[in-house]
């Protein structure tokens, strides 16, 4: 079974470009970094970061390497979850493929990532426990 290759027509965003863009934004937000901060670290404009994160512009290999260094993550982070030449997936370890991702998935939203970061920045387990109890109470659970 061969790997399906995707060609890019001018003006169209393909699944791989979109996936890499989402992973870029995910990692940046996970670190609590602004687009401007990332742009400064890479020596480019924040508008360019915006274009990368919307898959409006493809990310060249050298730039992807720069981004991985600035975001303190290996380059393969951007490709995790894509179909291709990766170890065989098992039911328990399978990552969601791009085509299976849902637009309404709360884990892909910036707001969710901010909430997670704020939660883990709390200084103690007891404070995190209080937040969990409050959320459960608000949800009637």
Image (cartoon, rainbow, N blue to C red):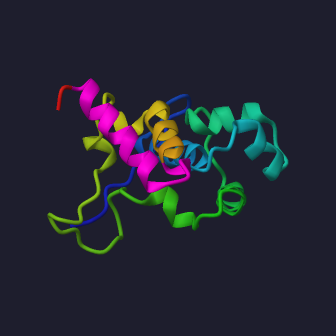
Q: Does 136 appear in magenta?
A: yes
Q: Residue at point 66% right, 53% down?
A: 60
Residue 47 visible in the shown view: yes
Quarter of the picture holding the C terminus: top left
How many numbered badges does the structure rendering display?
0
Occupied quadrant, residue 99: top left
Q: Front-most of 80 and 104?
A: 104
Quarter of the picture holding the N terminus: bottom left
Relative horizontal placement of residue 100, taking residue 107 as reference (left or right): left
In the image, residue 95 above or below residue 30: below
Seen as rendered, the residue at the extreme bottom is 87
Q: Residue at point 67% right, 62% down?
A: 65
Residue 105 visible in the shown view: no
In the image, residue 104 above or below residue 60: above
Percent from the top left, x then y, of residue 57? 63, 37
Relative horizontal placement of residue 61, taking residue 139 as reference (left or right): right
Percent from the top left, x then y, of residue 101? 30, 40
Relative horizontal placement of residue 96, taking residue 79 as reference (left or right): left
Q: Residue at point 58% right, 37% down?
A: 53
Percent from the top left, x then y, of residue 85? 36, 70
Q: Does 128 appear in magenta?
A: yes
Percent from the top left, x then y, of residue 71? 65, 57
In the image, residue 96 above or below residue 107: below
Q: Residue at point 31% right, 28% down?
A: 104
Which portion, as a residue range, is magenta?
Answer: 120-139
Query: Magenta stretch: dominant SS?
Result: helix
Occupied quadrant, residue 2: bottom left
């Amino acid at each position: 079974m061969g790997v399906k290759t995707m060609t890019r027509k001018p003006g169209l965003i393909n699944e791989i470009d979109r996936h890499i863009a989402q992973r870029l934004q995910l990692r940046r937000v996970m670190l609590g970094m602004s687009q401007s901060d990332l742009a400064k670290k890479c020596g480019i404009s924040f508008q360019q970061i915006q274009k990368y994160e919307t898959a409006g512009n493809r990310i060249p290999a050298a730039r992807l390497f720069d981004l991985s260094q600035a975001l303190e993550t290996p380059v393969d982070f951007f490709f995790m979850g894509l179909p291709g030449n990766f170890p065989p997936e098992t039911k328990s370890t399978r990552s969601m493929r791009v085509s299976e991702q849902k637009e309404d998935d709360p884990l892909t939203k910036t707001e969710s990532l901010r909430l997670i970061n704020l939660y883990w920045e709390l200084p103690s387990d007891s404070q995190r426990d209080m937040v969990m109890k409050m959320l459960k109470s608000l949800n009637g659970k």
